[in-house]
Amino acid sequence: MLLMSTEKNLVKNIDEWKLIKNPLLEGIGLMEIVTSSNVTIGRAKIDSPVKLKSHHHIEEQITVVIEGAMEVCIAGEKRIVAAGDVCIIPSNKEHEVEITEVPFLSFDIFTPYKKDYVEKIRG
């Protein structure tokens, strides 16, 4: 369960997967998260090939592809990341992703915790 401390405004652990609305995946896939006050882990499931819009975020991101493949472009450098591969996206680096092989499943680790995802759970 997600709890926010009103005293320090710190996130307490979510110890089960929570479905969130991720605008990058809207209508094409699902994103679930588990989070602590330091790290957020996202589980992305995508069933159709798609190109996600270019974006950046303050959190460093490590993506582990479990099934399928994607082409990732980070600051103009492209590479294929397939099942079993890992991709590190530094903080504030512009990046875009094209899901090229489906079904696609990845785990995305964000640090510090992904505040915008947590706020979506809070409602």
Image: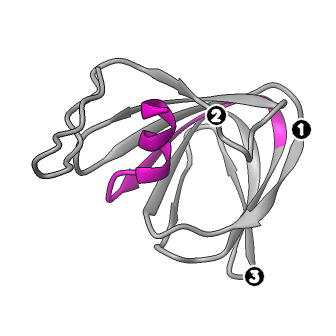
Secondary element at image label 2:
loop
Is residue 61 depicted above or below 4 in this figure? below
The quadrant holding residue 36 is: top left
Looking at the rendered structure, the kind of residue marked 1 is Pro
The residue range painted magenta reads 100-123
The location of residue 6, given as percent across then percent down, is 17, 43
Which numbered disc flags the more N-terminal residue, 1 or 3?
A: 1
Marks 1 and 3, how far apart at CA: 21 Å
Give above or below for 101 relative to 79. Answer: above
Graded by Cα atoms within 10 Å as few (under 14), some (14 to 19) or many (20 or more), the crowding at tag 2 reads some
| Labels 2 and 1: the sequence-earlier one | 2
Image position, residue 33 (x, y; %): 45, 32
Question: Which residue has dot 3 on it?
Answer: 76
**Nearest to N terminus: mark 2 or mark 3:** 2
Q: Position of residue 75 (x, y in %)?
A: 68, 81
Residue wearing tag 2: 21
**Is there CB contact under 8 Å for labels 2 and 1?**
no
Query: For mark 3, does the 10 Å Cα neighbourhood hold few (<14), some (14 to 19), or many (20 or more) residues?
Result: few
Q: Amino acid at mark 2?
A: Lys
Return the residue nearer the eye: 84 or 17: 17
Provide residue 77's location: percent of width, then percent of height: 72, 78
Q: Residues within 10 Å of mark 1 (few under 14, many from 20)?
A: some
Gap between marks 2 and 3 measured at Cα: 28 Å
Mark drawn on residue 49? 1
